[in-house]
Image (cartoon, grey):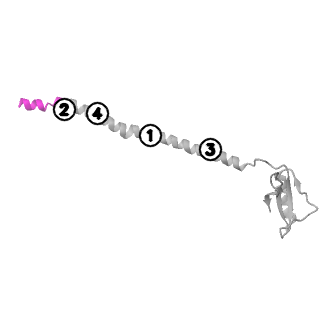
Amino acid sequence: MKALQKIFDWRTYIFTVIPVITFSSFVAVLFGQTIPGIILSFFKVAGECVVLGLVVIFAFTWFLKARPHNRPKSYRIIPLDIFGKKTEIEEIRTDFKTHDVAWSYMKQYKKTYPLHNFALVTDEKNSDKPTIFRYI
């Protein structure tokens, strides 16, 4: 009986079981909460940085594409009849230095001459044909 008691000594098992349970608990917390939490928070921040970077790149490329690189120095209004042929109207001003003023005059001409269409154009250095900005 004493030999059997020595084999099943509860103190030996307690000193063996407590470290195993403690270590397994530590491993479970480490791999179940700590490491996944660190990885998830890293990828959350990294994802936010990637999205923000893409937004900045998109905005920058849109800004470069949206603004005219070479602004024209002069604008012309070309009156067109109902068949689309260029016509001359003696009473109107056709040469302008700014786009906004030319557009304003063109809208007024459309009200005054409803049977005519008008094109706001500019002459570019590289092109033989005028570039049309607006057409009403």
Identity of the residue drawn at 14% across and 30% down:
9
Residue 131: x percent and y percent? 80, 57
- Whichever of callouts 3 and 2 sits on the residue coming sooner in the sequence is 2
Q: Is residue 3 magenta?
A: yes
Identity of the residue drawn at 63% across and 47% down:
58
Q: Is residue 116 magenta?
A: no
Q: Is residue 121 left or right of residue 60?
A: right
| Residue topped by disc 1 | 39
- Over which residues does the magenta segment extend? 1-14
- Amino acid type shown at disc 2: Tyr
Count neighbours of disc 2 (C-alpha within 10 A) and say few if under 14, some if 14 to 19, many if 20 or more. few
Gap between marks 2 and 4 measured at Cα: 14 Å
The label nearer to you, 3 versus 2, is 3
The label nearer to you, 2 versus 1, is 1
Position above or below: 16 against 39: above
Q: Is residue 64 left or right of residue 133?
A: left
| Residue topped by disc 2 | 13
| Residue topped by disc 4 | 22
